[in-house]
Amino acid sequence: MALQKPLEDYIQFLEKMSSRSLPLLHKLATPGMFFRDPLHEVRGVDEVIMIYEKRLAAVSVPRFKVKDFCWGREHPVAYLCWSYTGQRQGVDFIDQGISEVMFSHDGYIMAQTDYLGYQARPEATPGFCQRFLQKIRRV
C-alpha cells in the first residue's frame, strides 16, 4: 500500500513526540488538518500542535506507544490502537484509545479522531472522568 510509509512516519512522530519535534507535523499533515478528541475539535496543524503541547506540558515522563494498527476497507483510513503513559501530579496513569487517521491519496494526514478509553482507576483519570466513574459506581 502506498500509504504504509506515511503511516509509519506518523507512528514514529507520535512515539517520539517532544516539544522540539512537534513542528515536524507540518511535514506530515495537510495545512487544514482536522483533529477531534473528547475535549477538542480544531482545524489546522498549528491548532493540533497546541493540543499536543498542552498534553506534553501536563505530564511528566510521557510515553505514547502504538500497539497495533489496521487499514480501513474502502477509504485511506488507518486505525491506531495506542496507550499513553506517564505521571500527572506524581501519580502514574495509563490512557488507552483508538485513533482514526485519514490520509490524502498523496500521503498527508487530513484528519484524526481520537476515541479515548480511560483506565478504570479514578486516581489515574482526569477530574471529569473521576466524577463520571463515581456516578456510575453509585448506580
Image (spheres, helix red, strand yellow):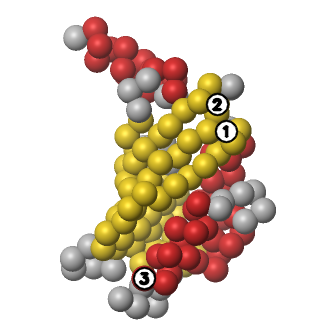
Do tag 2 and tag 1 residues touch (Cβ < 8 Å)? Answer: yes
Residue 5 placement (x, y as % from top left): 49, 84
Residue hosting label 2: 88
On-image quarter of the C terminus? top left
**Which quarter of the figure has residue 133?**
top left
Residue depicted at 47% across the width and 59% down the height: 66
Do tag 3 and tag 2 residues touch (Cβ < 8 Å)? Answer: no
Per the image, label 1 sits on a secondary structure element best described as loop
**For mark 1, does the 10 Å Cα neighbourhood hold few (<14), some (14 to 19), or many (20 or more) residues?**
some
Residue extending farthest to the top is 138
Residue 44 placement (x, y as % from top left): 58, 67
Residue hosting label 1: 59
Q: Looking at the image, which is closer to me, 65 or 106?
A: 65
Q: Is residue 87 left or right of residue 73?
A: right
Q: Looking at the image, which is closer to me, 7 or 114?
A: 7
Lower sequence index among marks 3 and 2: 3
The amino acid on which the numbered mark 2 sits, given as a three-letter code, is Arg
Lower sequence index among marks 3 and 1: 3
Residue hosting label 3: 4
On-image quarter of the N terminus? bottom left
Residue 117 placement (x, y as % from top left): 37, 40
The Cα atoms of the two marked residues, 3 and 1, are separated by 30 Å
Residue extending farthest to the right is 20
**For mark 3, does the 10 Å Cα neighbourhood hold few (<14), some (14 to 19), or many (20 or more) residues?**
few
Residue depicted at 50% across the width and 75% down the height: 8
The total of numbered circles placed on residues is 3
